[in-house]
Every structure is written in structure tokens, then in C-alpha cells.
Image (tube, rainbow, N blue to C red):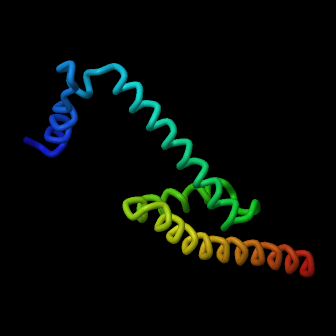
Amino acid sequence: MKPHEKAKAADDALIYPDGSLGRKRPEFAEALRDYREREREIKHQFAADLAEEHLTDQVPTEISDKVFTWAWSEGHSMGYSAVEDYYEDLADLVFAAFEAGQGYERNKRSRAARLG
């Protein structure tokens, strides 16, 4: 039996007093759907909070989203605090690179204006 088959069998093996199986019960599916929706909301708010705390509005949202995706993939198995640690480390690097890039663009425009 493959791992995903074992996991499904274990979920289906939840037997309730009335003899029904866990995954087959409509209230189980509804509760699981509600749980996953709430989990998504919490994760989304967590990402927004991290971006607000560690990256400024000057950094585009798609960049902060990528920072969160990487931090989540590296740290979520160790908990939210590990995700925050990974996020903070990468955000510092990204912000420094972003500021350096803006400085480079300002200098480039200034130099072009001087050379005219």
C-alpha cells in the first residue's frame, strides 16, 4: 500500500458510535472545509503582517509574496516562528538589494542628466 493510500485508509478508519466512517460523514467534510478556509485566512494575514513589519511599501507585493512563499516552504514544518525567522533574514537581503537598485537608478538618471 502506498503512503497516500495508507493515509486515506487511516482517515476512513475513523469509526463513530453510529458506525459511520470519518470521511464519509457530511459534517466531517464541512468541518474540514471550514478549518482549511480559516487556516488560509490566518496564513494570508500572517504573510501581510510580515510584509508590513519587514518590508516597506516601496517593495512590490509580488516580491514580498515570493519572500513569504520561500520562508513558508523552508520553515512551516517548524512553526510560525521559524517562518518569521526565514522571512526576516530574506527580507533584509531583499530590502537591501531593492534600495541599492533604487540608488543605482537615481545615480544613473543623475549622471545621464549631467552628461545631457
Identify the residue at horizontal 22%, vertical 35% (top origin): 11
Q: Residue at x 18, y 28 (%)?
A: 15
Report whether 41 appears left or right of 4: right
Classify 9 as above or below 72.
above
**Left or right of 58, for residue 97:** left
Residue at (48, 61) in percent of width and height:
80
Q: Position of residue 2 (x, y in %)?
A: 11, 43
Q: Residue furthest left?
A: 1
Image position of 15 (left or right of 94): left
What percent of the width, then of the height, locates residue 60? 69, 57
Residue 93 quadrant: bottom right
Q: Residue furthest front?
A: 17
Q: Position of residue 30 (x, y in %)?
A: 41, 25
Depth check, front residue: 56 or 29: 29
Residue at the (21%, 19%) spot, across then down:
18
Question: Which quadrant is home to the N terminus?
Answer: top left
The percent coordinates of residue 106 (x first, y second) are: 82, 74
